[in-house]
Image (tube, rainbow, N blue to C red):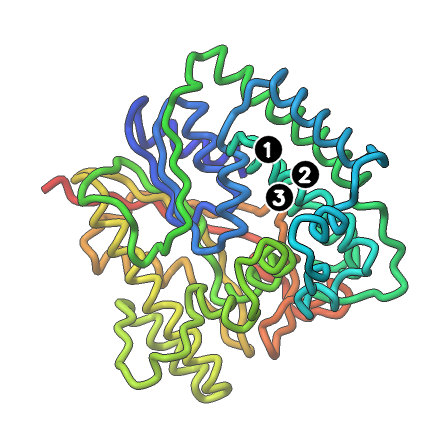
Amino acid sequence: MPQLAARLIEEYSSPNDWVVDPFMGSGTTLVEAKLLGRPSVGTDINPVAHLIARAKTQAIEPEYLAQTIEQVLSSLYNTAQPSLFEELLEKTAISPPEWHERLRYWFPESALQQLAQIQHAINRIPDDSVRTFLACALSHILKTVSFWHNRSVKPIRKLNKTTPDARVAFQKHLKRMARGNREFWELLTLHSRLDVPTLPHCADARTLPLVDESATLVVTSPPYVTSYEYADLHQLSALWFGRTSNLQEFRQRFIGRTNNNHARTLELGSTLAERIVAQLAEICPRKAREVALYFSEMATCFGEMRRILKPGGYVCIVIGNTNLCGVEAQNAQVFTEQLDALGFSIERVILREIPSKILPRTRDKTTGKFAKTEEANYIAYPTEYILVARRACS
């Protein structure tokens, strides 16, 4: 939530202090840091999140953006122009490109052609910041114009779904994004903060691309143990922009999903984590292994946060607990033990009701996977914890 990120940044840093979000998602922490005059760095292993964060954190001069958007939209509706396929045939004298099988699985042919037309128009824009902005808008409409069920965040097809014209959906969302950009630009201009650095990277929180002791504050909300579901949520954009051709491989990039570590002993950094894994092992060995790997890799991430923080710097972690196969995964308590083991002092633990979540708040108690609200038998992280820890001053 923007308000929470802003509050933490104001309380635990000063203007010109570097703020880092190792799991930046769509870039909310980076936006709030820029508005408050703090330079920031964000990382996310998900290339779709990186695209969104890049678009969200760069303010574009509103009139210039409006003119470019108008040019793009005009080209989409100008029937006198040759189609994308006609241009391709004319320039390359080959057959139209074959769509990836998963794209054909998710999109009707008409939508694919309209999306390709939009993509072609975006590619012709010379300004990288505007191209990123437009690509983010295109990414946003993919579910709308696909067979993806509108009432489901899970990847469920509805073949009788009526899909809108992609160009209309694109235009509608561009207008919404342009309004947000104008507000962002005006706020930054008002406070002379347009030039505050904001650096989003597509990178791994387990190996942060930052030098030692360079940041004053870390504010982040790590993924949950079922982080592969984030991969499922973003699969359409990952496929469309060519960031993956294999969904299984895409899932394996995320925390707790590496599949080649069965032989090595995992260091969890928490006795509570060991107990949770032992309980799960009696019920579901495979899930126990995933949870063990998740906790082990989160300990690695916390070690990286310690490395890049200056002495006396703070880390603020927002996380909730959940239930897997009938076993409560006490993520917040495990993280507290892991941070303590790394030499952090735990300054505060705040319990907070969750006002809203992009992900559904219900899970199947047996599998731990998200389920429809009316079918689920467990409410997933209806509250969350804010852990505030401090690196020792020496």
Identity of the residue furthest to the left in this view: 394
Q: How far apart are labels 3 and 2 at the CA level?
A: 39 Å
Q: Residues within 10 Å of mark 2 (few under 14, many from 20)?
A: some
Q: Name the residue under label 2.
A: 121
Q: How far apart are labels 1 and 2 at the CA level?
A: 7 Å
- Three-letter code, disc 3: Pro
Rendered view: 13 above or below 118: above
Picture quarter with the C terminus: top left
Q: Would you say 199 lies left or right of 162 here?
A: left
Q: Would you say 253 lies left or right of 306 here?
A: right
Q: For the residues labelled 1 and 2, say whether their Cβ atoms are less than 8 Å apart.
A: yes
Picture quarter with the N terminus: top right
Rendered view: 132 above or below 225: above
Identity of the residue furthest to the bottom in this view: 282
Q: Mark 1 points at which residue?
A: 125
Query: Percent position (x, y) of residue 94?
Result: 68, 60
* Quarter of the view holding residue 147: bottom right
The circle on residue 355 is 3
Q: How far apart are labels 3 and 1 at the CA level?
A: 39 Å
Q: Observer-nearest residue: 296 or 135?
A: 135
Residue at the spot x=60%, y=18% of the render? 64
Query: Percent position (x, y) of residue 78?
Result: 82, 33
Query: Percent position (x, y) of residue 281?
Result: 43, 86
Q: Say which element carries label 1.
A: loop
